[in-house]
Image: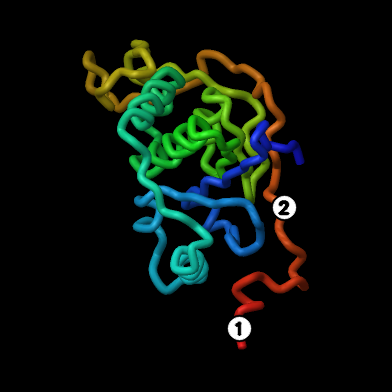
Amino acid sequence: MKSSLNKTGRRAIVIDTSALIAGFDPFSINEEQYTAPNVRDEITEHTMPWLRFKTAMESGKVRIKKPQKTFLERTKVFASAMGDSFFLSETDLQVLALALELRTDGYSPLIATDDYSIQNVASEMNIEFAPLSNFGIRRRLQWIRYCPGCHRRYPANYKSPRCQVCGTRLKRKPLKRNRVNHKAPQIIKQRPKHEPSQAQEQKP
């Protein structure tokens, strides 16, 4: 896996909801780990991902950090430019903004996510990502929105979900396909299943 360590040697994993649902275990790696406040609200209570995440938060293994507004606004500019704004939730934007803020603070952030729109925008922001249950994007896509009814085109940041001429709900298609410059890690290296996690080691 390509190293994402910078000159200070500080790497930080930013966890998205999709990674937790895919089975990511925060206790399986040693790097510092962060996530956005909204991620906590997207996980169904009393499920295995919820129990694992709850334990990780309570033990301090995962830190909840709300990104500053400045970084959230910068992230929205990237998302709008790529045409992914309509496909990113507020939680997704928080995750991306948090990674951007951590990079400014001297970390080399890596987003653990299976969400293609997050991966697409992260690539444009030159932030590494690691998919858990899929292969990740191979090309960075810049989108254009269009009306399937009257074929009118709209810019990627057009705010309405419907065509202003005929009222048909808009769709999107790639305007440009650029190869992802860096080789995104395909997985986050975790301990072998037979090796106990920190949570298991703490049990009496």
- Is 117 drawn above or below residue 41 in the view shown? above
- Is 150 drawn above or below residue 32 in the view shown? above
Residue type marked 2: Lys
Q: Position of residue 113 (x, y in %)?
A: 55, 45
Residue in the picture at 38% in, 24% down:
74
Residue in the picture at 49% in, 48% down:
16
Residue, disc 1: 203
Q: Please state which of residues 151 and 117 is positioned toward the viewer in this rendering.
A: 117
Q: Provide the secondary structure element on which disc 2 rests.
A: loop
- How far apart are the alpha carbons under marks 1 and 2? 24 Å
- Is 111 drawn above or below residue 42 in the view shown? above
Disc 1 crowd rating (10 Å Cα; few below 14, some 14-19, many 20+) is few
Q: Does the residue at mark 1 contact the one at mark 2 (Cβ under 8 Å)?
A: no
Give the label on residue 189, or none.
2
Residue in the picture at 52% in, 42% down:
115
Extreme-front residue of the structure: 8
Q: Nearer the viewer, mark 1 or mark 2?
A: 1
Q: Position of residue 71 (x, y in %)?
A: 38, 30
Residue type marked 1: Lys
As drawn, is 61 to the left or to the right of 78?
right
Q: Please state which of residues 115 and 13 is positioned toward the viewer in this rendering.
A: 13
Q: Position of residue 29 (x, y in %)?
A: 66, 57
Residue in the picture at 60% in, 17% down:
177
| Total numbered circles | 2
Q: Position of residue 69 (x, y in %)?
A: 30, 33
Q: Provide the secondary structure element on which disc 1 rests.
A: loop
